Amino acid sequence: MSFLGKVKKKLRNGSWYPFYNTFYEKNNLDPHMILLESRSGKALESNILSLLKELCQEPYCGFTLVLSVHRDSENEIKKKLQKNSIQGVHFVRTGSVAYYHALSRAGYLVNDTSFPGRFIKKEGQIYLNTWHGTPLKKMGRDNRPEMVTMGNVQRNLLDSDYLVFPNQFMEEKMSGAYMLDSLYRGTVLREGYPRNDIFRQPANLHLKEQVGLQGKKLLAYLPTFRGNFNALDDQGYMQTLSQNLSLWDSQLNEDEILLIKLHPFLHGLEDFSGYHHILPFPASWDTYEGLSVCDTLITDYSSVFYDYANSGKKIILFAYDRKEYESSRGMYETIDSYPFDYTEKAEEVIPFAHCSGGTPDNAFMQKYASYEDGHGAEKICRQVFLHEDCCRKYQYHGNGKKNILIYAGDLDLNGITTVLYSQLHELDLTRYNYFISFRSLYVKDHPERMERLPEGVGIYPLASEMNMDLLTMAVQLLKLKGHTGSWAEHRLHTAYRREWKKHFGSTEFACVIHYNGYEAYTTSLLEEAPCPRSIWIHNDMAREVHLKGNMNPYLLKEAYHTYDHIVPVSEDLIQPVVSEFGADRSRITVIHNCHDYQSVLERSLAPVAFNEDTLSNVSLETLQSVLDSDAPKFISIGRFSPEKGHKRLLDAFEQYWKEHPDTWLIIIGGVGNLYDETLAHTRALRASDHIILIRAVTNPMPILKRCDLFLLSSYYEGQGIVLMEAATLGVPVMACDVSGCHSFLKKYGGLLLEDSEAGLLHGMQLFAEGKVLPLNIDAERINHTSAAQVEALIAGDIHISPQN
């Protein structure tokens, strides 16, 4: 699809509103407007409903109440307002023009989840976030699949002026999962959940009469949703549910009714018409008002039992699939340690309901209902909207350490990611609070990339792409062609400052490191950081621009003139950035890459293995056979990309192989788009039966260790980390005499070859003659020096000069 086509599509489906930027910049705040949203406008329930009821009382008559309502939920929400005698509430359709207009004008914002990715909190807006439950299931940083998608939730929490935590346990888990303890600067309201007030008030028995259940003992079954939003196992789940309900129906007494409330995703699948004692949870009841008249709650992993404990009534935890659920989702605590009845057997559920016990004890209430007193809604509304000092407040002040933001790119299997993780393992992670940042768009399908993240490092995902408007887009296109004036530059910088505020709000960082060094959007975004900024250079960027076109020269020139520190990883990279981009030498310092040599040694001991997504022109068994043989084996490791020079390496090997037909060449590439082209070129060679190509293998070290010569055929490099890996494993190294290899091999040994196919062939011939040189690398010293330089840069103590 063309660029213009993409723009038209976004405008048609309403997913992109460029005029929100104008609303944000031009609209004045209305200090008497309150915009409320529950579950992205798809419901009116829980804390938001309870707060809305309170806001309809006399003390708040001067406020305008605006409710975000999703198109599919409008009728249901209207009925709920009418049932609760709530009048005078204005609707805005979630995601509409009116919605974004209200989002830019409301003096007060209230949410139980998060506002959308393009939302930017304005100066003067007061944001109350109540969240929607005490977490039993692991969340945020504690749940690997969620780590890569948590960015919008995290920034909404950090943007909030007030967060409501009804108990000590929730505060502890939410603070850790979203790193609030070191980043949040708002106010925590240690008050009960507004929705739980009803459990501490006299039960409204008229509710039973309204649905013809007077005189009945009511049990409520609220199971947790299983599966994920993209893969519902509804058929299997409903079959299991039907079997359980048939059993329970036969066990219930005549005066007992079991009310079932399933997840909204399963609505339309339930059929309770064939049971004597089982009914659907009445649609006319709000969930919590209905629970308040129930005598027993049956659930599994739903946080609703933390709330229902405020009633003091019986709770039965029925976790028939606990092992499976724990392994796929993870939980903070073992639920069978709670003072409730617990079973994994369906036949034991109703007998438990007929026994005494299973109610919350004092220890449970102290930990999980720490601040509940039945007046949550009233106290929170008076505190936030009337500015009365009536709540228990707590202000986070951090842990006394500076926050450091490191933008890491997509964390793919490449050299930059490898050296970043090596660098993190060398830094003193107790000295600062380090946060790795990445764009969720690039990482959301690869949560496994979080596996190597050190335990003490936080994350800060960038959840949304740019809030672009048409005029800014036009100016951006002009800039990319090198044509802008002062007005245009001002507009672009204003747009990226707005982007900074969108992503980071008032979060304070002492230093921002653009470690990736690529990506136009991120380069311009971090340029606007209100703190010292450093940009790393991992490659000859002039050659990158000319050969691959993966960065814009005008953006790079501005960045190298604007960032406070320019950090090439090799002395060879100084001259290109000065001569091609006009960088100021006084702001350049070389910091060599760290090398996790211990990990290399450990990984080399693992068995040779392919990934599920590995591509190769040979089987794993053939590769193993070659590695086990005494035949000479050359190897090169580097992405299948033009700058790696694989074609000339293959052609050189073709010439060498004619005289040494027992020799093998292995090329391993992690990413890059030239694998198929390289494979086609290989198949056209006479030596193809002695050439092994491998794409995407997590651990190449066992293969590298068993080879006899490492050849780097690149046209340019940053600082080839693969050279250090080969040296660590005792494999001799030869490389073309190019930027990034020259200074490294001059300093540490190895052979520099003429930058040509003939030079590579000559290197192979030198190997045949036994003329190889070992590298003499003190990796521990390099790592210590590099880590010290990074920490000095962060502290502002580094002496910037081309020589250091």
Image (cartoon, rainbow, N blue to C red):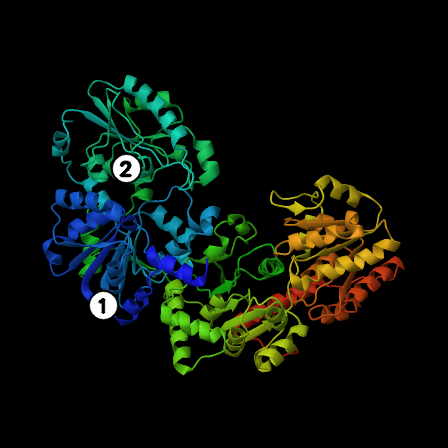
Residue 804 or 473: which is nearer the viewer? 473
Residue 475, relative to residue 94: is it above or below?
Answer: below
Instruction: Kindly indicate the quadrant of the structure image that contains residue 4.
Output: bottom left
Residue 258, relative to residue 413: is it above or below?
Answer: above
Q: Does the image show residue 91?
A: yes
Could you tell me which secondary element the residue under label 2 belongs to? helix
The amino acid marked with disc number 2 is Ala
Q: Which mark is residue 309?
A: 2
The amino acid marked with disc number 1 is Leu
Residue contact between numbered discs 2 and 1, judged by CB atoms under 8 Å: no
Where in the figure is residue 499, as x and y percent of width and height? 39, 67
Mark 2 neighbour density, 10 Å: few (under 14) some (14–19) many (20 or more): many
Q: Does the image show residue 800?
A: no
Q: Describe residue 529's horizontal placement relative to residue 170 as left or right.
A: right
Residue 768, relative to residue 602: is it above or below?
Answer: below
Q: Quadrant of the C terminus?
A: bottom right
Residue 507 or 609: which is nearer the viewer? 609
Instruction: Kindly indicate the quadrant of the structure image that contains residue 106.
Output: bottom left
Residue 391 or 8: which is nearer the viewer? 8
Residue at image mark 1? 29
Instruction: Kindly indicate the quadrant of the structure image that contains residue 385.
Output: bottom left
Per the model, the C-alpha gap separating discs 2 and 1 is 40 Å
Residue 81, relative to residue 346: is it above or below?
Answer: below
Report the mark closest to the observer, 2 or 1: 1
**Which of disc 1 and disc 2 is earlier in sequence?**
1
